């Protein structure tokens, strides 16, 4: 369904998309059962792939300039040290905001207020962040009459989003197909002036990872498009309006298959690193704190006693003792960093080597 409009600057006619209520939409297509089950059962014994990949999903410059930032720079920033590394700090903050957004979007009932708050948190510097748009927007082209997609007019946004939020809350047991419909409807509505793609990723990631066996093993299907410049998803709104669900599901089928396969490869890289580490621990009985630290370095391979105190509530003495145990085994290495001046940090080479390989896997075509 479309609404005919006239663009005042050139008096040109254009058509706005006007999607039906989600309750009235039907989709006869299903993703292959074997693919869905494999995706939902994905498991990783160590590390946190969702956290690992969040740096690329947070929007802004996280996938462009931010992609060039090394994992060590980001890990140092997560220690809470005062460092003059603005780009690393920005990417770290964006990633943290994205992960917090996922937690907020999983709460039920989900409200429009929460949705707007999450939108604002993901892009706090946007002048109209957290508010539905009050102007006409479009995707592609210089004006609505030559655009690729023209979302609904602003006066329809509130009603459409109320319908959208009601659909989310009314689903008793959400499926991947439900999430695909919600994601596509959100993109059709395009309720905010900016940041719609970022929020849509967060919504779908929150819902998809929540229904997985192991959310730490989740790799967003959207990363398939972002990392590989896949254009199929951009054609989804037009395909939906024409009833061509097959085109939509073709994209998701490929993206979910990529997500599952990539998670399996990345988990193996981490397990290989873990195997190298375990060889250094042969016949060594670790204390409880050292064992906890050993498990944690797969997610944060640079630590300090102060960081461990903040993370686990240990005393500085307990943190230092745990670090010393892993130093003596050769699992951790001691370094001094220039900033803050002569600060001593401890890192794990095996994990950083694995992370370098994992990033290469994510972006190989």
Image (cartoon, helix red, strand yellow):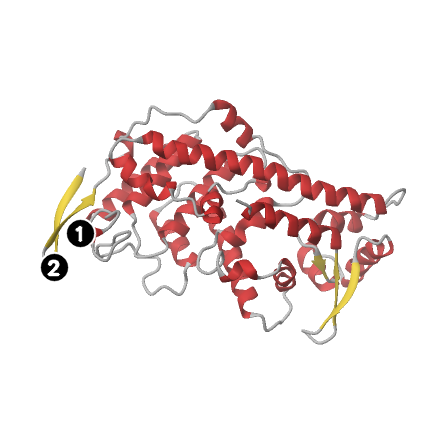
Q: Residue at x 40, y 65 (%)?
A: 125
Q: Is residue 49 left or right of residue 244?
A: right
Q: Is residue 346 visible?
A: yes
Q: Residue at x 72, y 59 (%)?
A: 303
Location of residue 347 (image quadrant): bottom right
Q: Horizontal and vertical percent for residue 265?
A: 63, 39
Label 2 crowding class (10 Å Cα cut-off): few <14, some 14-19, many 20+?
Answer: few
Q: Horizontal and vertical percent for residue 70?
A: 61, 60
Q: Is residue 106 visible?
A: no
Label 1 crowding class (10 Å Cα cut-off): few <14, some 14-19, many 20+?
Answer: many
Q: Horizontal and vertical percent for residue 55?
A: 53, 54
Question: Along the polypeptide, which appears first: circle 1 or circle 2?
Answer: 2
What is the residue that sits farthest to the bottom in this orientation?
A: 341
Q: Which of the labelled discs sits on residue 227, or is there none? A: none
Mark pair 1, 2: CA separation: 9 Å
Front residue (pair 212, 277): 277
What is the residue that sits farthest to the front in this orientation?
A: 365
Look at the image and tell me in which quarter the N terminus lies: top left
Q: Is residue 328 left or right of residue 162?
A: right
Q: In this figure, what is the number of numbered marks?
A: 2
Label 1, on which residue? 145
Circles 1 and 2: CB atoms closer than 8 Å:
yes
What is the residue that sits farthest to the right in this orientation?
A: 283
What is the residue that sits farthest to the left in this orientation?
A: 11
Front residue (pair 139, 99): 139
The secondary structure type at the circle numbered 1 is: helix
Q: Residue at x 41, y 29 (%)?
A: 172
The secondary structure type at the circle numbered 2 is: loop
Q: Residue at x 62, y 35 (%)?
A: 43
Q: Which of the labelled discs sits on residue 10, or is there none? A: 2
């Amino acid at each position: 369904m479309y609404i005919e409009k006239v663009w005042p600057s050139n008096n040109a006619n254009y058509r706005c998309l006007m999607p039906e209520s989600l309750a009235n939409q039907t989709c006869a297509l299903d993703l292959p059962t074997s693919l869905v089950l494999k995706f939902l059962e994905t498991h990783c014994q160590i590390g946190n792939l969702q956290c690992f990949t969040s740096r690329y999903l947070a929007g802004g410059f996280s996938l462009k300039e931010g992609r060039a930032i090394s994992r060590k720079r980001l890990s140092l920033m997560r220690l809470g040290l005062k460092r003059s590394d603005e780009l690393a700090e920005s990417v770290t903050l964006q990633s943290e905001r994205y992960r917090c957004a996922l937690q907020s979007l999983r709460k039920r009932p989900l409200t429009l207020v929460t949705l707007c708050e999450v939108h604002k948190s993901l892009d706090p510097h946007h002048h109209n962040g957290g508010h539905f748009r009050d102007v006409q927007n479009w995707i592609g082209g210089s004006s609505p009459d030559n655009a690729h997609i023209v979302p609904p007019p602003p006066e329809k946004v509130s009603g459409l989003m109320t319908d959208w939020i009601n659909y989310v809350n009314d689903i008793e047991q959400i499926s991947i197909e439900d999430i695909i419909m919600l994601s596509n409807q959100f993109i059709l509505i395009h309720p905010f002036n900016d940041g719609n793609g970022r929020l849509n990723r967060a919504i779908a990631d929150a819902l998809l990872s929540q229904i997985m066996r192991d959310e730490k093993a989740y790799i967003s299907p959207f990363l398939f498009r972002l990392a590989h410049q896949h254009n199929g998803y951009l054609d989804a709104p037009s395909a939906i309006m024409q009833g061509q669900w097959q085109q939509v599901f073709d994209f998701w089928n490929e993206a979910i298959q990529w997500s599952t396969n990539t998670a399996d490869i990345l988990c193996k890289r981490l397990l290989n690193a873990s195997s190298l580490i375990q060889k250094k621990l042969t016949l060594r009985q670790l204390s409880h704190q050292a064992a906890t630290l050993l498990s944690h370095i797969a997610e944060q391979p640079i630590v300090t006693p102060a960081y461990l105190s903040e993370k686990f509530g240990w005393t500085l003495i307990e943190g230092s003792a745990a670090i010393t145990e892993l130093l003596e085994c050769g699992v951790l290495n001691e370094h001094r960093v220039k900033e803050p001046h002569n600060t001593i940090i401890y890192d794990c080479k095996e994990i950083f080597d694995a992370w370098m390989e994992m990033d290469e896997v994510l972006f190989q075509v």
